[in-house]
Image (tube, rainbow, N blue to C red):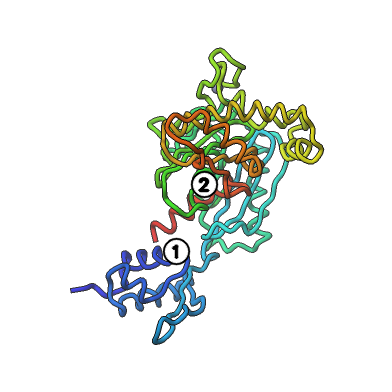
């Protein structure tokens, strides 16, 4: 006999059904989850009493009474994501639907020192205070870093891009009365992109920012045995080629980091693309042509390894929309098995994807545990 009480499992399943479908109805939930309408009703009433869902209108009638449209309450819980880089800090406040409710970006050089950590904590407290966030509804602070991060233990095993002290997590956790988690920046950005695309098909995310990183997404982030999965920046593209910050030569990072382009425009990547397109700077165009040649090799290699969409993200990916056709033509010529390169995509989530991905950990955890 069916258990028609408000059980933890039923409540969670009903909530997740609405969350994943965007909207749902009593009838759809009953049919999809295989539980009776009275049980669904009881669970819905419980979720409404908790302030987690609400009636968002009515579905168009297909004959008979119109069904109530149910939606999750996006701001029932909130999380903060912080992207810490060598030169700046971005803080975002997100709700359960990953809407960015507020954000702030500050240019400040990374320092492994207490006053820097204090400054990070102040940024978070400021955004919480400004938005009147109720501590009862606040899930935690996710921090994304250009480092290899063991996300289970919150330890940093390698941080060649910036010098992050071993006790970074302990120092940051001390600053907050909320849970804190650390994440690799490219993994966080890739996970955000996967959510934004809405389909759970395998995907490779190539993060083309001041350093090149990446993420392999098969439902979740594939981290590998040593949390180094997706470190595409250190694939060798040119034997004995240009020096990379890792100490080796010929890494993809040396050829396709955003700096290869933005060093011409004082670190401003948008300015590079603006000068190239609007002002027709031919020198920049030649630099970009060479950039695409190396990038195409990396993309083709990734396609050969993973046989899935390759998404160009990071600072350069976000600027490449109008060059995608041209870029696909270059990639296509390298492909042994395919006549087009439609699998190469431009990232769809372009606003602070790493910071949002760090906050997403708490959102995902809340939705899975409810
Ligand atoms: Zn390298």
Residue extending furthest toward the top: 240
Left or right: 266 with respect to 293? right
- Do residues under tags 1 and 2 come within 8 Å of each other at their CB atoms? no
Visible residue check, residue 162: no
Q: In whole angstroms, how far apart are the C-alphas of marks 1 and 2?
A: 24 Å
The earlier-in-sequence mark between 1 and 2 is 1
Nearer-the-camera pick, 2 or 18: 18
Residue extending furthest toward the right: 279
Where does ligand 1 appear, by image quarter?
Answer: top right
Residue 246, given in percent of the width and then of the height, sits at 56, 21
Residue placed under numbered mark 2 in the picture: 180
Nearer-the-camera pick, 260 or 353: 260
Q: Nearer the viewer, mark 1 or mark 2?
A: 1
Circle 1 sits in a helix, a strand or a loop, which is it? helix
The residue sitting at 54% across, 38% down in the picture is 186
Nearer-the-camera pick, 51 or 15: 15
Residue 258 lies, with reference to residue 92, above or below; the image says above
The C terminus appears in which quarter of the rendering? bottom left
Circle 2 sits in a helix, a strand or a loop, which is it? strand
Visible residue check, residue 255: yes
Residue placed under numbered mark 1 in the picture: 19
The residue sitting at 28% across, 76% down in the picture is 36
Residue 263, given in percent of the width and then of the height, sits at 73, 28
Q: Residue 320 is drawn in which quadrant?
A: top right
Residue 235, given in percent of the width and then of the height, sits at 50, 24
The residue sitting at 57% across, 16% down in the picture is 249
Queried on whether the Cβ of the residue with tag 1 lies below 8 angstroms from ligand 1, the answer reads: no
Left or right: 258 with respect to 160? right
């Amino acid at each position: 006999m069916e258990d028609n009480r408000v059980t933890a499992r039923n409540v969670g399943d009903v909530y997740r059904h609405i969350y994943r479908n965007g909207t749902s109805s009593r009838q759809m939930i009953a049919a999809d989850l295989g539980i009776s309408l009275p049980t669904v009703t009881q669970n819905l009433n419980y979720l409404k009493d908790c302030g987690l869902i609400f009636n968002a209108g009515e579905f168009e009638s297909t004959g008979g009474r119109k069904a109530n449209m149910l939606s999750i309450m996006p701001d029932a819980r909130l999380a903060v994501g912080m992207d810490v880089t060598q030169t700046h800090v971005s803080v975002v406040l997100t709700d359960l639907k990953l809407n960015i409710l507020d954000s702030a970006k500050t240019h400040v050089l990374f320092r492994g020192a207490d006053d820097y950590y204090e400054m990070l904590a102040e940024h978070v407290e400021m955004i919480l205070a400004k938005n009147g966030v109720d501590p009862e509804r606040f899930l935690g602070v996710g921090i994304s870093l250009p480092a290899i991060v063991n996300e289970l233990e919150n330890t940093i095993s390698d941080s060649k891009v910036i010098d992050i002290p071993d006790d970074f997590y302990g120092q940051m956790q001390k600053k907050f009365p909320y849970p804190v988690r650390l994440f690799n920046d490219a993994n966080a950005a890739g996970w955000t992109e996967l959510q934004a695309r809405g389909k759970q098909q395998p995907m490779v995310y190539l993060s083309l920012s001041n350093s090149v990183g990446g993420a392999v997404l098969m439902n979740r982030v594939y981290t590998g045995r040593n949390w180094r999965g997706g470190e595409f920046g250190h694939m060798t593209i040119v034997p004995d080629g240009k020096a990379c910050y890792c100490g080796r030569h010929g890494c993809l990072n040396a050829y396709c980091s955003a700096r290869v382009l933005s060093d011409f425009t004082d670190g401003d990547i948008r300015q590079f693309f603006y000068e190239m397109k609007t002002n027709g700077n031919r020198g920049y165009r030649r630099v970009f042509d060479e950039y695409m040649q190396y990038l195409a090799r990396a993309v083709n290699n990734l396609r050969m390894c993973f046989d899935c969409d390759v998404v160009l993200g990071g600072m350069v990916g976000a600027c490449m929309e109008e060059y995608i056709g041209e870029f696909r033509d270059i990639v296509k010529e390298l492909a042994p098995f395919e006549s087009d390169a439609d699998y190469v995509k431009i990232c769809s989530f372009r606003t602070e994807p790493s910071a949002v991905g760090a906050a997403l950990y708490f959102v995902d955890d809340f939705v899975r545990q409810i």
